[in-house]
Amino acid sequence: MHPLGEKYLRKSSLPTLFCPGCGDGTILNAMIRAIDKLGGTDHFLFVSGIGCSGWIPVFINADCIHTLHGRAIPVATGLKMAQPGKHVVVFTGDGDCLGIGGNHFIHAARRNLNVTVVMVNNYIYGMTGGQVAPTTPEKIVTKTTPYGNIEAPFDACGLARAAGATFIARHTTALPRLLMNDLVKAVQHSGFSFVEVMTQCPTQAGRAIYGSGEPSVLLNELKGRAVVAKNVELKPGQFRVGTLHQDASRPPYAPIVTAEGTA
Amino acid sequence: MAEPDAVKIIHGNEACVEGAILAGCKFFAGYPITPASEVAEVMAARLPAVGGVFMQMEDELASINAVVGASWGGIKAMTATSGPGFSLMQEGIGYAAVTETPCVIVNVMRGGPGTGQPTLSSQQDVYQAKYGSHGDYEPIVLVPSSAQEALDLTVRAFNLAEEFLVPVIVLTDEIVGHTRERVAIRAPGEIKQRRKPGQGEYIPFRPMPDHVPLRGNFGEGYHILVDGQLHDEYGNRVGHIPEKSAQHVQRLCDKINQNRDRIADVETRNIEDAEVVIVSYGSSSRPALRAMKEARAQNLKVGWVKLKTLFPFPDEQLSAIPARAFLVPEMNVGKIVREVKRATGKPCLSLPKLGGELHTPAEILTALKEVM
């Protein structure tokens, strides 16, 4: 095992339950490198929702709470109020964050709650067998859109921006070093930080959306669509990666403390 | 009992807040709903003064889950709601049960179902409090009948939550919540804290002989894994292993049922020689007590029991009562009467009342005479 794995993985929970070729292992890898750069797991508390991405922090040897579907952000809210000195990092999926948990997501952003939300976007409900998600592109055939998806997908980063998030980044598992760098910046940011990670899902989304369950094909597809340069116009199907927005001027959520309370 | 810090005329909702603060509550997350909103309003004013945090959340789902997060962060936490909000919280209450998260949920009952009767009282949520979330688990449910009991039982709710690592529901109702009465602000007895791990390896979900584990908090270096899936003593999922899954659920139930003598509590009057005993709980206890006194004035051998714990149900206390029959007035279609029947094995007359108003003592007295 890699020395960082030796140091930071929760060995009693291994092996992971990710499918072969899943991007969640790459995200776990990037997070562990970010933890190492930020002084180790004792500075972190992890919270996750339901879905494949909810398992990512379970394999980190740190305090971790694997919550109900959609409720990771409220749990993180209470946890941050109790432990304001720790980095609280949430792992959630596109369905967990934008579907069942959408209300909590926008309100945590509005509050500028000082937590980091890593939203793993595989465009589909993977763990339940490949149903349409709030991020699935139009016309795509999934298990619950047998005649093609008739709904428009969410732009998660745009939604985070509109709701008041003060750090927003988009990345992909095809460019993991960039992801790791922005995970560090997101955790260091004071306020609500949001990192969307576009990932491959060979088992479900790969077949439904790209017609391939081959991880290398899917990673190349993501690499081809990701645009790193800031001044280049996006072509249809492309998405921008990197830090999309950062505003250090707005103070993070801080509860009222009265004079008696501090005494 | 200790001298009160103060005697105030306050309603039951405010009394819940006073009780919570005496018990050491440092976090409240809630969402406005009639007739429970005053709990949040008074918390918002009072918590910052004791170094606590009040948050008005976006809904009741967020409220109960924020309470779970704060509890794992190591502070005592509570929420309060009514009817529809209590329904929304059920999934979170089940999550608190499976993860053994100590927390307190106040449900100020109003009439249901649906939006129901926001401004009037009921006792329709008694089974929801016990069975509201899916799966097998055992919550503790306490039922105050006055503002003073709202304070006392909120303190007890925090104590029981810490002692048994379980969600505890304080089931008040609109009448208790909104009736202003004299309340002595004092903690009844010792304030309990979760039992901390000692030296050496800490296994977060390994039970002690009373079926309850020790509890370390997040941020203390234990690297705890908390999972809503069925899990082993280390927190690792065991849903695919029938034997370990069964063990987990059985222990969650055993730690309440096998400690019933430490939890279940009733108050009794005149039960020794009574032919008929009125079994009441919550605000219905008030006309029931009056009816018992009027019956005694007419030389009728009537006794009275007030259930202060609804679940675990006080089977032993009820089955020890020598009466011939029982009368159970309730502000619902007749629910707890089934528990009384089961526990006593004797004839039980149900006196249900819908509509939002208390029984009158005369209604209870008339029913008593039918049973005598």
Image (cartoon, coloured by chain):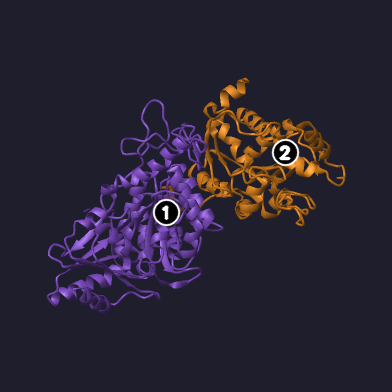
Chain colours: A orange, B purple
Q: Position of residue A110 (x, y in %)?
A: 63, 54
Q: Position of residue A115 (x, y in %)?
A: 59, 44
**C-alpha distance separating marks 2 and 1:** 47 Å
The residue drawn where x is 61% and y is 23% is A4
Q: Quadrant of the C terminus of chain B?
A: bottom left
Residue A115 visible in the picture: yes
Labelled disc at residue B10: none
Of tags 2 and 1, the one toward the viewer is: 2
In this rendering, would A148 be left or right of A112? Answer: right
In this rendering, would A255 be left or right of B206? Answer: right
User: How many marks on residues?
Assistant: 2
Residues packed near mark 2 inside 10 Å, few (<14), some (14 to 19) or many (20 plus)? many
Labelled disc at residue B49: 1
The residue drawn where x is 45% and y is 35% is B244
Q: Residue A105, relative to residue B177: is it above or below? A: above
Q: Amino acid at mark 2?
A: Thr
Q: Residue B280, relative to residue A150: is it above or below? A: below
Q: Which residue is mark 2?
A: A199
Tag 2 near tag 1, CB within 8 Å: no
Q: Position of residue B310 (x, y in %)?
A: 32, 58
The subunit carrying tag 1 is B
